Amino acid sequence: MDKLDLTKTDKVYYTATTKPQLIHIEKAHYLSIVGKGDPSESAFSDNIQALYATAYAIKFIFKASNNDFVVPKLEGLWSFDEEKYSNISMDEAPSKIPRSEWNYRLMIRMPDFVTKEQVETAIDIVTTKKQIKLASKIEFYEMTEGKVIQILHVGPFDNEPETLKLIQAFSKENNLQKNGTHHEIYLSDFRKTSPDKLKTILREPVK
């Protein structure tokens, strides 16, 4: 039996070009864990480890019933205190706001057939059998982004402001306004990929 691969069955979600596009994203659900702080610190990588351990626990539950799937790409929602930093534009935020001030929600999308109860079962397996206590912070998270501007960023994360300027210009040209949290989909594994070869979808919900 073929494994379900969301990157192939939902190309709208996982495909972007190097020019801004306006698309619509339907409701989806995820494994999710929240945190705050510099992504170069150990807490960030520990959260990723707990998230992936739980994702694979769910995968193996379904594989045992001949309903296997490929674990999807890591994603992140990034935000900061918009009252405190109200004078900083979208493209300036990555360089002007200290990394310690960023809030994040790391996510791995799940197939539609995965339920909240099955996620809770997997979390229990990871916390008790694998002794990854941090997995207890993981939750079943639903999100409907709706209308978004998205673009493919190629290269280091430090160069994202250049790509965000393209989103900002597109938004202004089309009289669109921010309507949600900055979203990144990591098409490349940034733990193993050279920075200049990284591919990341940047997504901004708008109205």
Image (cartoon, rainbow, N blue to C red):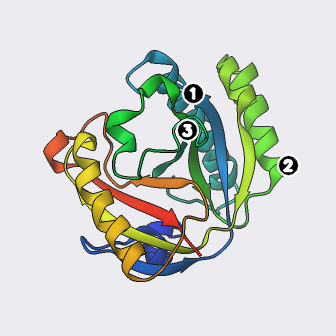
Residue 179 horizontal/vertical position (percent): 61, 65
Q: Position of residue 168 (x, y in %)?
A: 37, 65
- Does 81 sit above or below residue 201? above
Amino acid beneath label 2: Glu
Alpha carbons under labels 2 and 3: distance apart: 31 Å
Q: Could you say which is closer to the camera, residue 98 or residue 50?
A: 98
- Quarter of the image for the N terminus: give it: bottom right
Residue 33 locus on image (x, y percent):
64, 36
Cα separation, mark 1 vs mark 3, equals: 9 Å
Query: Which residue is the site of mark 1?
Result: 36
Tell me, yes or no, if residue 153 can be seen here. Answer: yes
User: Disc 2 marks which residue?
Assistant: 117
Q: As shown in the figure, which amino acid type bears the numbered disc 1?
A: Lys
User: Quick one: which residue is furthest to the right in this view?
Assistant: 117
* Residue at numbered disc 3: 80
Residue 67 falls in image quadrant: bottom right
